[in-house]
Amino acid sequence: MINLGFYSGKKLPNVRVQSTLLDRAMEGVALLLWILLGVLALYCLLRMSDSDLPKKALASWGAYTLMMILVAYASYAPVRQFNFPFRVTERTVVVQYRLATRLCRVLNITMGLMFLAISFAGVGPMLDLNKALTFVMLPVVMLVLTVYWVLAYKYK
């Protein structure tokens, strides 16, 4: 169940929306972030076995793998699995469903950037970049959720 609000999609018709090029591109970016995080974690494991960084990077990669699988499932979940923030009718179900699945894809990308920043926070010359990414991502996630709510209200 993807809980975005109080109004259940259980009684709505089961719609399937074709993924657009933008949706596929967002999934590709999330997959590239996952591959990058995995390669960097393995590199740290092979090159810096004496430090604490490889454990942190591998744990971050594992956590992102789990989160990516869950959010990727949510991107393709049927309408009955969603709770929407506003009342959804048969007339607006397609738009609300597309907004909810795009929210899942955008959150997948922001989580990838967050895990990338967290796993390498405090490492050498990238210290400032990692701090910036770590502290910027929470407002970005809040902005994404706010934009989703505004658009969901607009198209209710």
Image: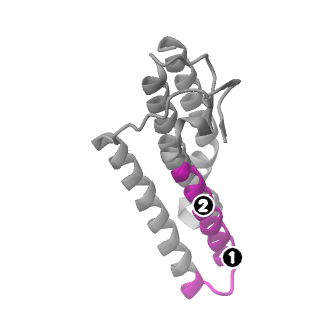
The secondary structure that most of the magenta stretch takes on is helix
Q: Going 56% across and 59% down the picture, which residue do you hit?
A: 69
* Secondary element type, mark 1: helix
Magenta stretch contains residue 94? no
Three-letter code for the amino acid on which mark 2 is drawn = Tyr
Horizontally, residue 54 falls left or right of residue 46, namely: right
Identify which residue, 77 or 28, lies in the foreground: 77
Give the labeled residue for mark 1: 55
Relative vertical location of residue 86 with respect to residue 50 in this rendering, above or below: above
Is residue 127 among the parts visible in the rendering? no
- The label shown at residue 110 is none
Residue 41 in sight = yes
For residue 19, side relative to residue 148 (left or right): left
**Residue 81: where, in percent of width, then height?**
61, 39
147 w.r.t. 153: above or below:
below
Q: Residues within 10 Å of mark 2 (few under 14, many from 20)?
A: many
Question: In this rendering, which labeled residue sits more in front, label 1 or label 2?
Answer: 2
Q: Which residues are magenta?
A: 45-73
Q: Position of residue 136 (x, y in %)?
A: 59, 40
Amino acid at the residue labelled 1? Lys
49 falls in the magenta region = yes
What residue lies at 69% left-to-right and 76% top-to-bottom? 55
* Front-lying residue, 150 or 36: 150
Q: Nearer the viewer, residue 81 or 39?
A: 81
Please name the residue that numbered disc 2 is placed on: 64
Query: Helix, strand, or loop for circle 2?
Result: helix
Q: Is residue 86 above or below residue 113?
A: above
Work out whether mark 1 precedes mark 2 in sequence or the reverse, and give the earlier one.
Answer: 1
Which of the 4 image quadrants contains residue 7? top right
Quadrant of image for the N terminus:
top right
Q: Position of residue 93 (x, y in %)?
A: 48, 24
Label 1: how many Cα within 10 Å (few below 14, some 14–19, many 20+): some
